[in-house]
Every structure is written in C-alpha cells, then in structure tokens.
Image: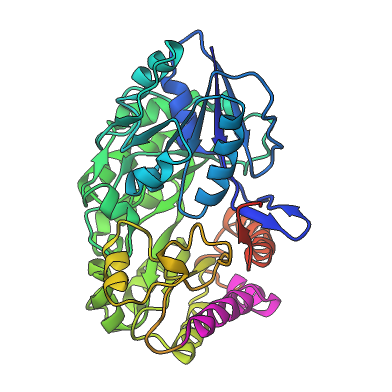
C-alpha cells in the first residue's frame, strides 16, 4: 500500500507557484508517518518546493489544510480525485469547516489524528474509507516519534521541529488554536520528548507548541530534562514567563535562544477587547518585561496583530518604531484575520464587517496580507497599506542595522549574532515575496 502526504503551498506569484525559502519541516505529517503501520510505503510532496506528480501510483492521499492554504489544498485534492485516488483531509481548517472540506475530499478527519490514523489506514487498505473520522483532542503523539526520513532532500531550515504540548489556556478572541483545543493544554511525557530529541542528530530545535509555558510547572520539568542534552532551542511563549524567575533561569540553562512572544498591541483597550490576559495591566508599555528578557540575553520574535478597533494608521506606524527601538530580533506584522470558528469571526459577522462574502480564504480577489474585514478607524485598504508599511520599515536596512547593535540580546553571543545576520535578510525576502500573493494557483 502507498500513502502520499501533501503539504500545500500558499498560492501563485506572477511567474509561478510560491516557493518558500524559509520552509520548515511539516511536523504533523512526520507524526502521521510515525503512526503508520509497518509495510506501508510513504511519500511526502511538499508543494512549497516539489512539483507534484499526480500520476504517480498511490492508494491514499492525505492533505493537511489551513485557512491560508485551503484554496490550494482543494485544487490538489480535485486533481487526485479526478484520477479516482481517494483523498482524506485534516487539520484545524478541516475541524472548523468539515462540510466545506468534504466537498473536495472522500474523507475528513477532524480533531487530532493520533487516535484515528491506524483506523484510517486500515479502512483505506480495505477500500472502505469512512466519510468522517473524529479524533478529539488530547496528549500529542503518544509514544510516537516523527518519521524524519520523510524530510530528506527537501531543503528545510536546519533545525528539528518537535512538540511538547498543544493548546493554550488563554481565551484570545482571534485565536483559532484556543477554539480548536477548547482552551486546554495537553503535554507529552517529558521522557518521550527527550527520547525523540536523542534519536535525532541536530543541535538546533524548534518546539512548535502554541504556548510552551502554558503550564509553568510542566515546562520547568521539561527544561530540567533538556539541560544535560546541550541543545539550542526556540519556541512560542506568552509574556507572563517573565513573572517566574525560576522558569526564566531554567529556560536559559536548557539552551533557549529566545521565543516568539505575542505582544499584539500597545493599546490596553485593544488587549482588553482581544482578551489577551497575560499582556494586560502592563502599563509601562512592556518595559519591565523586555528588560527581564534582555537580562537573560533572550532574543525575541515579537508578534503584533494589526487592525483591532482602537488602531489607527498612525498608532500602528508608531508601534513599529517602538518595536525597532526595543531591538527585537524578529517581528511579525500580522493583519488581524477572522478565522472561521473563532469568537472574532462570529463578532465581525454579527456586525456585518466581513469582506469577501465571509470566506476570504476561497475568494479569488483576496490577496495574502490583506484585510478581510472592515476596521473601525480606517478603511480595509488603509489597514492593508499600513501593515505593508510596517513590514517594509521593519525589514529596511537601517532597521536591521539598528536592531543588530544590542549587546544584551542580538550581539550577546556569536551564535545569536550569526542567527540574526542569517535570518533577517531571509525573512526580508520572504516578506516581499508574499505581499499581495494570490491564494491558490488557478
């Protein structure tokens, strides 16, 4: 039996399909490969770099679907189904909109796949694939390691992706992850994580957890176990990490270089509206938190959400200048996106503020990094243009040079300085390539 896994790309540039230079391993597909019984042949087509051979023989195609890749995922699924190859689709988008996904698939897998994948494979082998499978949510990849041989030759960034836990306890209005996991956090046994790390050869790791420190005490157990492994790692973590000195100490001792941290906004009214609890009541505009991160020499990837109800073009541009002054290593300037299944989507729909007929991820006129709703204090076009202005300013040569010259973080070690110099130009190129990208390739 042959199973083909597919990771769709975003869409199409003027001169051809988008090719992602900053692509990372699709961990979810590696985990499914690890869960697949012996005797099954596996292949991975990563649409971000591969040219998919639709005519290659296969018995089942498994496609992971996100909102931004849904249009392309459906194109791929339709090509296989036209050749009478059965297709199963899963992921957060499939869980949020299973009926929509079912229009392009023989089967839809909602929730986590771990507890249902063996059944899917068995049913596909018997040619009796069920139209729906539901895995619920729970402990990630129980006693299973990702099959990393699947990634060979794909040119991924030189770091191994792993996960300790899934989900986040906070209730941010815009977050699809919170809705998917019902604001619960599920962690793997630390021994399983350590065993998976030891089975690999890379020193640099990226924990893909939605919030690695969602449970401070569980994170401390993980960090203590990481210390003797002498690895270097990054992840995603909420700003409340700075309130726990022991957690910060163990984080650094275990090899942390820095984390993606959702600052989201400098406006407390915005933070209240989005329900960003760990960020509230920081009336010093995050000064104390940033000072603590600097004291520990941690580089920060600051994430911002642009377009909340109290934002204006001027306030967003001021926020960008503020971020440059903080010497953050990297930053994401994300237009607020109404993902289906989130409280934000429901609120904007009730207020008649959604654009593109409410399904921006499928609309032929929608472009990547564009506003998909009507903001309150600017037009949708102004929000799109202002977000792009923030990306251009952040990625400018003067900004990169200014931010580099921070001895507490970006210049605190040769490793950190090297990563800064390597990845800032890369992310600059990717920002320019993605802007205005059409979703899908047709």
**Where residue 119 sits in the image (x, y, percent)?**
34, 18
**Where residue 277 sits in the image (x, y, percent)?**
22, 68
Q: Which contiguous range is marked in magenta?
A: 379-404
Left or right of residue 178, residue 329 in this image: right
**Where residue 195 sits in the image (x, y, percent)?**
39, 25
Q: Is residue 185 above or below residue 82?
A: below
| Observer able to see residue 4 | yes
State the residue in front, 159 or 149.
Answer: 149
Residue found at x 63% / y 53% = 11
| Picture mark count | 0
Residue found at x 57% / y 81% = 385
State the residue in front, 140 or 366.
Answer: 366
Residue found at x 44% / y 14% = 127
Q: Is residue 194 above or below residue 217?
A: above
State the residue in front, 189 or 17.
Answer: 17
Q: Is residue 395 magenta?
A: yes
């Amino acid at each position: 039996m042959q199973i083909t896994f597919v990771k769709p790309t975003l869409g199409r540039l003027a001169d051809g399909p988008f090719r992602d230079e900053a692509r990372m391993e699709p961990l979810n597909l590696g985990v499914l490969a690890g869960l697949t019984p012996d005797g099954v042949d596996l292949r991975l087509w990563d649409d971000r770099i591969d040219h998919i051979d639709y005519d290659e023989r296969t018995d089942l195609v498994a496609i992971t679907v996100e909102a931004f890749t849904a249009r392309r995922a459906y194109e791929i699924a339709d090509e296989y189904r036209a050749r009478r190859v059965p297709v199963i689709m899963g992921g957060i988008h499939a869980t949020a909109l299973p009926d929509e996904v079912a229009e392009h698939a023989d089967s839809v897998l909602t929730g986590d796949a771990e507890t249902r994948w063996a059944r899917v494979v068995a049913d596909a082998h018997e040619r009796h694939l069920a139209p729906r499978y539901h895995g619920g949510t729970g402990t990630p990849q129980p006693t299973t390691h990702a099959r990393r041989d699947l990634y060979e030759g794909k040119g991924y960034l030189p770091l191994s992706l792993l996960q300790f836990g899934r989900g986040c306890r906070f209730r941010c209005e815009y977050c699809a992850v919170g809705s998917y996991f019902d604001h619960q956090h599920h962690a793997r046994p630390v021994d399983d994580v350590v065993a998976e790390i030891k089975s690999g050869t890379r020193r640099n790791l990226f924990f893909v957890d939605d919030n690695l420190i969602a449970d401070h005490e569980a994170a401390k157990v993980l960090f203590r176990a990481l210390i003797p492994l002498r690895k270097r790692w990054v992840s995603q973590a909420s700003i409340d990490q700075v309130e726990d000195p022991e957690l910060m100490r163990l984080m650094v001792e275990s090899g942390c270089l820095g984390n993606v941290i959702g600052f989201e906004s400098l406006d407390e009214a915005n933070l209240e509206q989005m329900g960003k609890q760990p960020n509230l009541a920081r009336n010093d505009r995050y000064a104390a938190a940033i000072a603590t991160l600097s004291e520990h020499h941690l580089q920060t990837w600051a994430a911002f959400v642009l377009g909340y109800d109290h934002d204006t073009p001027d306030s967003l541009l001021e926020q960008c200048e503020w971020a440059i002054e903080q010497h953050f290593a990297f930053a994401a300037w994300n237009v607020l996106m109404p993902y289906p299944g989130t409280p934000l989507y429901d609120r904007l729909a009730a207020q008649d503020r959604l654009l593109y007929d409410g399904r921006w991820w499928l609309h032929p006129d929608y472009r990547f990094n564009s506003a998909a709703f009507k903001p309150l204090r600017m037009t949708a076009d102004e929000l799109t243009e202002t977000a792009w202005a923030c990306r251009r300013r952040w990625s400018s040569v003067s900004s990169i040079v200014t931010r580099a010259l921070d001895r507490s973080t970006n210049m605190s070690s040769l490793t950190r300085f090297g990563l800064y110099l390597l990845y800032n130009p890369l992310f600059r190129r990717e920002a320019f390539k993605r802007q205005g990208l059409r979703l899908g390739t047709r």
